[in-house]
Amino acid sequence: MPDDPSESGVVVPREVFDRLLQTQDLAELKAILAVFRLSGRASGRPVPVASVLGPELARTIAGPLNPEGAQLRAQRAIDRAVTNGALLRISVESQTGREAFVVPCTEEGRSLVDRLRAADPSAAGEVGLSSSADVSVYRPNVFAFYEQHLGPLTPLVADQLRDAERSYPRLWIEEAIIAAADSNTRSWRYIETILTRWEATGAPDR
């Protein structure tokens, strides 16, 4: 069982904290912090989206002066946090139906999601899911993935990404974008060079 958030601190890893500092939308920031609190001290336990959209918490996330409905505003904040990489979203199909969860994008959260996706029964048991539950992981489209790692798209780069999708596997493009981000090289030519090299020599085995 997760730690009771009312009785323990909330740990936000440095990598996530740095990302929070770049969050420009207040509702998105509050949604991320709410998920961390509900996830417990380990920050790796899935949180039902429905619990974040409860009336009281949704109003807190949306803010009292927002003209949109609180649940709609909170849902949009969660969606942005997923697209921007602060949260992971999984969908679980079981005998009782389909339910959406969000997980803090920490080392623990990523490891848990990978194990759930691999149908690891021990992982399912850790979070109270049936070992027969079917878990699928949401992946943002390649344009959102680029913006998440390298910043805003230009129309030219958007066209180049569309062309790349016709020529290379999605995973290759994502790995090349991550490589560009790791080297702090925000250049499409750099990404294209990586893809061309992998086409000739084979991509790394991930």
Image (spheres, grey):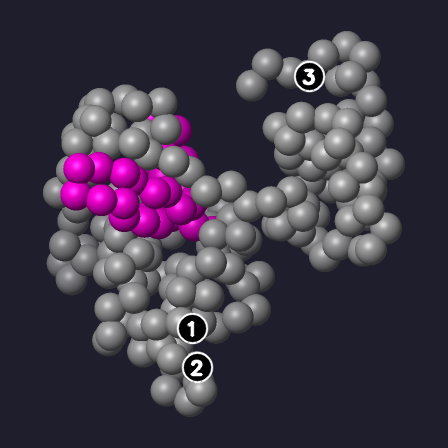
Residue at the location (82% across, 55% down)? 155
Q: Which callout, 1 or 3, points at the residue further toward the start of the chain? A: 1
Helix, strand or loop for disc 2: loop
Helix, strand or loop for disc 1: helix
- Asked whether residue 82 is drawn in magenta, I would say no
Q: Which residue is mark 3?
A: 203
User: Amino acid under label 1?
Assistant: Arg
Cβ atoms under marks 3 and 2 closer than 8 Å? no
Q: Residues within 10 Å of mark 2 (few under 14, many from 20)?
A: few
- Residue 41, visible in the rendered structure: no
Cβ atoms under marks 1 and 3 closer than 8 Å? no
**In the image, is residue 1 above or below residue 19?**
above
- Left or right, 49 with respect to 198, comes to left
Distance between mark 1 and mark 3 Cα atoms: 40 Å
**In the image, is residue 80 above or below residue 15?**
below
Q: Which residue is mark 1?
A: 73
Q: Which callout, 1 or 2, points at the residue further toward the start of the chain? A: 2
x%, y% of residue 173?
69, 32
Residue range (magenta): 86-115
Q: Residues within 10 Å of mark 1 (few under 14, many from 20)?
A: many
User: Amino acid under label 2?
Assistant: Glu
Q: Which residue is mark 2?
A: 68
Distance between mark 3 and mark 2 Cα atoms: 46 Å
Mark toward the viewer: 1 or 3: 1
Cβ atoms under marks 1 and 2 closer than 8 Å? yes
Distance between mark 1 and mark 2 Cα atoms: 6 Å
Q: Quadrant of residue 93?
A: top left
**In the image, is residue 168 above or below residue 198?**
below
x%, y% of residue 18?
53, 54
User: Amino acid under label 3?
Assistant: Ala
x%, y% of residue 34?
32, 62
